[in-house]
């Protein structure tokens, strides 16, 4: 099972950015840490697609269904 979540932080000059973190819950391996100023659902899908190619798709993916509303797009 993989899980993904978004973390928000800011640079030294106060500009906000978000980090997409994807981990394998069994091994606790960090599969991806992707920083962007703004995430769209296609950004998440692109990262997941690359991980599926590299590792194979997991049986389940967990998300907190946050304000990005990407869970429905990922499911499709």
Image (spheres, helix red, strand yellow):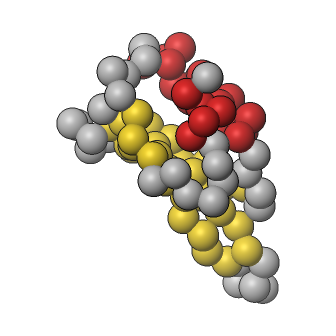
Q: Position of residue 9 (x, y in %)?
A: 61, 74
- Which quadrant of the figure has residue 45? top right
Q: In the picture shown, does residue 30 fall above or below 48?
A: below
Q: Is residue 41 visible?
A: yes
Q: Is residue 47 visible?
A: no
Residue 67 versus residue 55: which sits nearer the camera? Answer: 67
- Which quadrant of the figure has residue 8? bottom right
Side of 59 relative to 74 (left or right): left
Q: In the picture shown, does residue 54 fall above or below 27?
A: above
Residue 12 versus residue 26: which sits nearer the camera? Answer: 26
- Which quadrant of the figure has residue 75? top right
Q: In the picture shown, does residue 27 fall above or below 18?
A: above
Q: Which residue is pictured at 60% across the width and 36% down the height? A: 72
Q: In the picture shown, does residue 44 fall above or below 75?
A: below
Side of 19 relative to 3 (left or right): right
Residue 73 versus residue 13: which sits nearer the camera? Answer: 73
The N terminus - image quarter:
top left
Q: Position of residue 10 (x, y in %)?
A: 67, 77
Q: Position of residue 21 (x, y in %)?
A: 49, 50
Q: Which residue is pictured at 50% across the width and 41% down the height? A: 32
């Amino acid at each position: 099972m993989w899980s993904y979540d978004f973390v928000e932080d800011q640079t030294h000059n106060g500009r906000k950015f978000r980090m997409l973190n994807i981990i394998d819950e069994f091994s606790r391996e960090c599969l991806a840490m992707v920083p962007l100023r703004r995430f769209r659902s296609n950004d998440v899908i692109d990262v997941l697609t690359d991980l599926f190619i590299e590792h194979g798709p997991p049986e389940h993916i967990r998300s907190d269904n946050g304000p990005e509303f990407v869970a429905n797009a990922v499911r499709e």
